[in-house]
């Protein structure tokens, strides 16, 4: 039996990306390869970035072909949600949860959420550009990339 760690992938990337047809094609091929060659069936998503939005669209397209794959939204807001909001989220994802380790986090909430997704994944698809520096500080994506490297995850980095 494959453990959840072996058949999972998370997506992390900058808030703003250069979305090109080439990027979309490359991402689609990488994601489909993970599904067909590596038996990945669970994908973790955060929010707040164009990269997350693009990956969500591509995984959703692939879900038409591979009905068994799951999209999981890992929230960085709202530790508790009401039934109405949960029903709304479950129209788009197969599950959602708030990481226990993020409870009480303030500015570092997105970092903690990203760590959670990385820890639960074998594969990390990361969109990182060296010259991207919001507000002249280290980007959250760079922090996540460094953590994924430290955790010895299999990283598929974009842009290629």
Image (tube, rainbow, N blue to C red):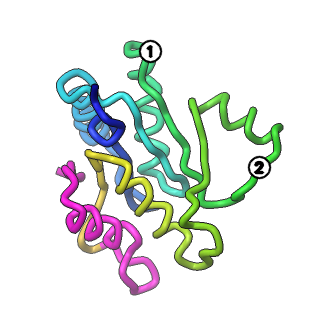
Mark 2 or mark 1, earlier in chain? 1
Q: Identify the mark at residue 67; answer none if there is no mark.
A: 1
Q: Which mark is residue 151?
A: none
**SS of the residue under disc 2:** loop
In percent of width and height, residue 83 lies at: 81, 38
Residue 132 x %, y %: 33, 72
Nearest to the observer: residue 146 or residue 6: 6
Residue at horizontal 36 percent and vertical 37 percent from the top: 4
Residue 16 located left or right of residue 149: right
Q: Is residue 150 magenta?
A: yes
Question: What residue is shown at x 60% (from left), y 42% (from top)?
Answer: 96
Magenta-colored stretch includes residue 76: no
Residue at the extreme front of the image, as rendered:
1
Front position in the image: 117 or 51: 117
Where residue 19 appears, as percent x and y from the top left, is: 36, 47
* Residue at which label 2 appears: 81
Instruction: Classify mark 1: helix, strand or loop.
Output: loop
Q: Would you identify the image quadrant in which residue 73 lies? A: top right
Tell me the residue at 56%/57% (across/down): 99
Query: Is the residue marked by circle 1 packed among few (<14), some (14-19), or many (20+) residues within 10 Å?
Result: few
Q: Residue at x 71, y 58 (%)?
A: 78
| Image: 35 above or below 96 | above
Image height check: is 115 above or below 52? below
Q: Nearer the viewer, mark 2 or mark 1?
A: 2
Q: Is residue 144 above or below residue 158?
A: below
- Which range of residues does the magenta coloring cover? 132-160
């Amino acid at each position: 039996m494959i453990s959840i760690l072996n058949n999972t992938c998370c997506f992390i990337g900058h808030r703003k990306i250069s979305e090109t047809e080439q990027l979309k094609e490359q991402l689609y091929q990488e994601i489909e390869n993970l599904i067909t060659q590596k038996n990945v069936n669970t994908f973790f998503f955060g929010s707040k970035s164009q990269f997350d939005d693009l990956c969500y669209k591509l995984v959703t397209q692939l879900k038409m072909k591979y009905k068994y794959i799951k999209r999981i939204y890992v929230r960085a807001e709202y530790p508790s949600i009401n039934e109405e909001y949960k029903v709304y989220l479950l129209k788009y994802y197969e599950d959602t949860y708030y990481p226990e380790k993020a409870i009480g986090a303030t500015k570092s909430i997105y970092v903690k959420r990203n760590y959670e997704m990385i820890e639960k994944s074998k594969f990390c698809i990361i969109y990182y550009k060296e010259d991207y520096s919001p507000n002249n500080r280290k980007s959250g994506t760079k922090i996540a990339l460094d953590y994924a490297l430290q955790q010895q995850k299999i990283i598929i980095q974009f842009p290629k």
